[in-house]
Image (spheres, grey):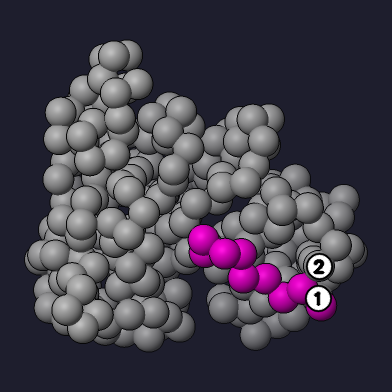
Amino acid sequence: MPALLRLEEVSKRFGGLVANDRISLEVQEGEILGLIGPNGAGKTTLFHCISGFYTPDSGRIFLRGQEITGKSPEEIAQHGIARTFQIVRIFKDLTVLDNTIVGALLRTRSVQEAKKKAVQILEFTGLKDKMDRLAAHLTIADKKRLELSRALATDPVLLLLDETMAGLNPQEIKEAVDLIRAIRERGITVFVVEHVMEAIMTVCDRIIVLDYGRKIADDVPANIATNEEVIKAYLGERYHVAG
């Protein structure tokens, strides 16, 4: 089966800094794929290239065999890629419901249809009882969940999650992992950047590792945890001993 998302030799530079260095990868439909690496490894830059916020300097990106390289974020959202951000981007002066309606309006011009869809999404993500609350008044965990709700309301085929567990307590992390699994069960493929190793090793089918802009590993979690190059670059001796 052809990959849902395919990157061919994607590079992105900022002056003399090579943030992504000829990265090739595939995301298979229905999987939860992890992307890890040290700070500055190029993870968020790669998400920016996939979602249209950056245009790669070289290389090509395909979604279901159709090239999307260099398309705008709006066009890429129409194609079926949605994302969240490292620093949450929500409309703080709008309610939880109205934030989610904004996402649903990508697929319909009817506000009533968008509202119906938004309520369904908020029920799924556990925010329905807070849908009339201003987004600015939510906890960090709920703000992240709201941004995820808005992304889901666009009906994506591929969801990019950029550190959705950062700043969460252990119970909130468990709930986030359960929600990611539930999203996959709805037929949505998930590509996740995360630093919470216990979570990503548990939830992902496969993990890709970046270091200094290069892909250094692409394997199942058990093999990633014992990969000497990955341990040296990122995981540290705790994982080496555990392996």
Three-letter amino acid code at the position of disc 1: Leu
Q: Nearer the viewer, residue 7 or 224?
A: 224
Q: Is residue 66 left or right of residue 198?
A: left
Part of the protein shown in magenta: 85-93
Q: Position of residue 206 (x, y in %)?
A: 28, 36
Q: Is residue 158 left or right of residue 13?
A: right
Q: Position of residue 157 (x, y in %)?
A: 42, 59
Q: Is residue 11 left or right of residue 234?
A: left
Q: Is residue 73 above or below residue 218?
A: below
Kindly give the residue lying farthest to the top in the view shown. Answer: 242
| Label 1 Cα crowd, 10 Å radius (few <14 / some 14-19 / many 20+) | some
Quarter of the picture containing the C terminus is top left
Q: Position of residue 33 (x, y in %)?
A: 33, 44
| Mark number, residue 94 | 1
Residue 88 covered by magenta stretch: yes
Q: Position of residue 98 (x, y in %)?
A: 78, 73
| Label 2 Cα crowd, 10 Å radius (few <14 / some 14-19 / many 20+) | some
Tell me, yes or no, whether the two marked residues, 2 and 1, touch with CB atoms within 8 Å. no
- State which quadrant residue 154 falls in: bottom right
Q: Residue at x 46, y 28 (%)?
A: 198
Three-letter amino acid code at the position of disc 2: Ala
Answer whether residue 91 is visible to the viewer in this image. yes
Residue 95 covered by magenta stretch: no
Q: Residue at x 52, y 41 (%)?
A: 180
Q: Kindly identify which residue carries mark 2.
A: 136
* SS type, badge 2: helix
- State which quadrant residue 136 falls in: bottom right
* SS type, badge 1: loop
